[in-house]
Image (cartoon, grey):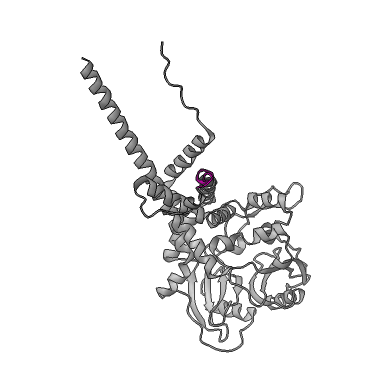
Amino acid sequence: MARGPKPQRRTFRYWLQQLHLWVGLILLLPLVMMGITGAVLVYAHDIEHLLGQGDPPVKTAGEWQSAAKLIEAAKAANSEPGRIPIAVRWPIEVGEPAAVRLSRPGMANERPQFRGGQQGGQATGAPAQGRVPTQSPFAGSLQILIDPVSLQVLETQQAMTGWVRFFHDLHGHIFIPGGVGREIVGWLGVAMLVLGCSGLYLWWPKPGQWKAAFQVRRKAKGLRLNRELHGAVGIWSLVIFMLVNFTGVYLAFPQQISAAVNTVWPGRDMRAAMFQARVEPMRGTAPMDVDEAVELARARVPGTRFLNAFLSVRPDQALRVGLIRPGHEEGAPIITVIIDPYRKGVVDVFDPQAMSTGEKIIAWQRALHYGIGLGGVYKFLVFVSGVIIPIFAVTGFLMWWIKRRNRRAGERARQAILQGAGQAAE
């Protein structure tokens, strides 16, 4: 009795190809959405300026006023009770406005809540490790733009509104509050990392085919065109694609990624340390004002200038001062000095020049994802990393659809031949 053909053995490449295919097909629309919204957000502020929606320009020449005077000007312009100053920022360049952030009403009386890390100890008395606030202090805040020379109030803004807010919320947490949406977005980033790694393995050419693997032939059509375009775009953009998606995963899961990085390159959990910095209020002692804190910070790190300050909302909260050196690229990590306003001393300093390898990796994650801090070329590459996702989606879908159509056509032809053979035999 004749035996039928042996079933083909499923190889690792086959199963990886199936993983690559079905992850891409199932998540096609969400991944395309992430790519398009990310690409738009890279140039969001530039688009705002083109549309006349950017920050108002400053034309007054002269010396910039101190942080304390900027805060007083903002408080005088505010008529809503319950809003307190939480941050102040000098411009990066001449011609830009300064800004003061006023909290959402009643924020000073809110009980802080944290997420992530190890639970600290009301029982043990130990501080929580690796934990950050569940809600941004800027949520519901008011930004007042001020002429840094004349102290004239130029504009009052709600925290990120309009079309930029729409794209930001869609890309950052798909309109799902409470951290769940951000985690979903993080897992979409993990899926793109899986697609990138599996795509590299599937693309890897055989000996003698390396040159062709980087190209799309002019005469290529149909399935071949889509395959070559999919592979060539993927390999040329692989590094920036993986980098942007890894940093996106970090923004969704900062504690977990920081812990993983620190196991290889030990360092401090800077993000949590900044949020958790606490001081002990001294009875009968008034805290130092922001200008004193700025001078103390600059004395600790010479050769710098003031950029921003995050003010103490509660009595036990430390004050943070941000400094930059000459030639600083906007968006790059800044120097952060944490200050005890009661004892008028420096608690800690986070200086990019003195950070460990692990700390530098973590400090650069946000800038690398947003396309800032490394100049216009890098910014464009981050934009490209979003634009290519729809290309992957279209070419990948067409490859699957063409193969499926050809397979079905072949099956129909085979059935027709068998049916014809059966009729001839009769």
**On screen, residue 335 above or below 223:** below
- Which quadrant: the N terminus? top left
In this view, the residue in front, 394 or 422, is 422
Q: Give the quarter of the image for residue 112.
A: bottom right
Please state the extent of the stretch shown in magenta in the rendering: 201-208
Give left or right: position of 213 versus 126. left
In this view, the residue in front, 281 or 331, is 331
Question: What residue lies at 64% left-to-right and 49% top-to-bottom?
Answer: 256
Q: Give the quarter of the image for residue 411.
A: top left
In this view, the residue in front, 79 or 196, is 196
- Magenta segment main secondary structure: loop
Q: Tell me residue 285's x, y (percent).
A: 77, 72
- Which quadrant: the C terminus? top left
Question: What residue lies at 51% left-to-right and 46% top-to-bottom?
Answer: 205
Q: Tell me residue 313's x, y (percent).
A: 64, 66
Q: Tell me residue 50's x, y (percent).
A: 41, 74
State the residue lying farthest toward the top: 1
Residue 237 forms part of the magenta stretch? no
Residue 225 visible to an observer of this rendering: yes
**On screen, residue 419 above or below 72:** above
Q: Tell me residue 96's x, y (percent).
A: 53, 79
Q: Give the quarter of the image for residue 53.
A: bottom left
Residue 206 forms part of the magenta stretch? yes
